[in-house]
Image (tube, helix red, strand yellow):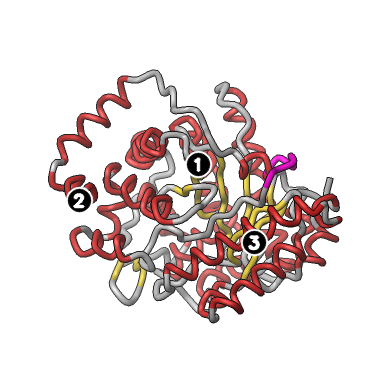
């Protein structure tokens, strides 16, 4: 009943937004800081867990909202983005919420049109084809105004969470955004974008530098609005080998970490953990651990034992999303194996990529509850795994 009334009486949301804008930005006290402590390498009572795309199409309540609103309307309407962000928190015992938005709001802010087509995904009607097309981008964009709807959603959600769990903000990384902007959407090869790397080196770096500048400003504003952790998604790193990754991705990821930390320090916004997730960059996880982030996210192809050998900071991941299709007992066994392999220190449990839209929500519950139960058991038994990473 509450869910229905929420969207039939929009004035209540409007009034709350106005109250938030007039407030001194003081938020309810945080009741569960497990994920923040784990990100900083502190001792925790159990392993914190959340999943990428946890607010999304696998939830029937989200699908109901999509019947009434198109994708980017939800992203650009703070009260709708807030409601969708809260949906998985009501259902599951997650240790963090992640604001509902999309990595492609940055190309939109730069002046590019992005459509979300059913059954296809994001589509750019006019992608970047030639370096001269860079002149079409708004290089002086003010993300404080262009993406204000994201910040309003973050602030509103912080209040509506009532301190239950921390709120994660996020962005796409420069190369991943560049790929979409040139390919015109998703791609199995990213060949058009990679062509730029080989044939248009100067233009490629020009675009990546622009995106980096905008991303830094965007993330700082997310923290100012109330985000308590930040994740940078380099989802297309898998298309880059070690050499291309170290030229066209890693330096910009490093610049983002340094720029955000410097920016939030200058504005007195405290110390916010940064997570980097470079899907497919197994060859560079050690270098990523020295890139200025607090946590390295791992996809499902990375062996936990190898990760612990090469990553000296906290890690996040990395169950194969398809494992959630398994029978319940098999899923419990695979999740247990994952937790024991990583150990319970300096660790945030997650999937190795985003959850798929046809997933049974009960499998998510099994995953989350198993992470909590197994990690608590390890702690109580004084298992050596709980002391490996001090």
Task: For label 1, count other residues whose C-alpha is less than 10 Å away and answer few (under 14), some (14-19) or many (20+).
Answer: many
- 185 up-or-down from 267: above or below: below
Left or right of 286, for residue 212: left
Q: Residue at x 63, y 31 (%)?
A: 271
| Disc 2 target residue | 1
> For the magenta stretch, what is the residue range?
39-45
| Disc 3 target residue | 317
Q: Main secondary structure of the magenta part?
A: loop
Q: Quadrant of the C terminus?
A: top right
Left or right of 194, for residue 78: left
Which numbered mark, 2 or 3, is in the foreground of this view? 2
Q: Residue at x 58, y 30 (%)?
A: 263
Left or right of 116, for residue 90: right
- 128 up-or-down from 20: above or below: below
Residue 56 locus on image (x, y percent): 38, 62
| Disc 1 target residue | 165
Q: Residue at x 68, y 60 (%)?
A: 374
Secondary element at image label 2: loop
Of pointers 2 and 3, the one earlier in the residue sequence: 2
Which numbered mark, 3 or 1, is in the foreground of this view? 1
Q: For this rendering, which residue is in front, 143 or 165?
A: 165
Q: Residue at x 51, y 60 (%)?
A: 52
């Amino acid at each position: 009943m509450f869910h229905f009334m929420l969207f039939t009486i929009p004035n209540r949301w409007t009034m709350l937004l106005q109250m938030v804008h007039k407030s001194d930005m003081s938020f309810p006290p945080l009741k569960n800081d497990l994920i923040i402590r784990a990100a900083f390498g502190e001792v925790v009572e159990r392993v914190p867990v959340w999943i990428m795309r946890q607010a999304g199409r696998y939830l029937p309540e989200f699908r109901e909202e999509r019947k009434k609103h198109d994708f980017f309307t939800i992203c650009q309407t703070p009260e709708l983005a807030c409601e969708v962000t809260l949906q998985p928190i009501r259902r599951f015992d997650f240790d963090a919420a992640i604001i509902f938005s999309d990595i492609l709001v940055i190309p939109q802010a730069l002046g590019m049109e992005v459509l979300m087509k059913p059954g296809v995904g994001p589509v750019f009607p006019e992608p970047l084809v030639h370096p001269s097309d860079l002149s079409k981008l708004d290089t002086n964009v003010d993300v404080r105004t262009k993406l204000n709807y994201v910040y309003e959603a973050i602030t509103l959600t912080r209040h509506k969470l009532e301190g239950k769990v921390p709120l994660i903000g996020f962005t796409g990384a420069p190369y991943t955004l560049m790929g979409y902007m040139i390919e015109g959407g998703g791609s199995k090869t990213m060949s058009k974008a990679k062509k730029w790397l080989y044939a248009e080196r100067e233009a490629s770096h020009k675009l990546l530098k622009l995106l980096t500048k905008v991303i830094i400003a965007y993330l700082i504003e997310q923290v100012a609005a109330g985000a308590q952790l930040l994740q940078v998604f380099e989802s297309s790193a898998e298309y880059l080998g070690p050499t291309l990754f170290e030229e066209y991705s890693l330096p910009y990821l490093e610049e983002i970490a340094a720029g955000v930390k410097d920016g939030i320090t200058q504005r007195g916004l405290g110390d916010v953990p940064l997570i980097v997730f470079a899907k497919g960059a197994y060859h560079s996880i050690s270098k990523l651990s020295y890139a200025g982030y607090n946590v390295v996210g791992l996809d499902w192809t990375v062996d936990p034992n190898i990760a612990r050998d090469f990553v000296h900071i906290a890690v996040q991941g990395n169950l194969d999303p398809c494992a959630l299709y398994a029978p319940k007992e098999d899923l419990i066994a695979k999740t247990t194996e994952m937790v024991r392999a990583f150990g319970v220190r300096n660790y945030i449990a997650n999937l190795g990529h985003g959850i798929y839209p046809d997933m049974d929500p009960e499998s998510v519950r099994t995953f989350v509850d198993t992470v909590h139960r197994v990690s608590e058991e390890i702690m109580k038994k004084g298992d050596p795994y709980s002391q490996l990473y001090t």
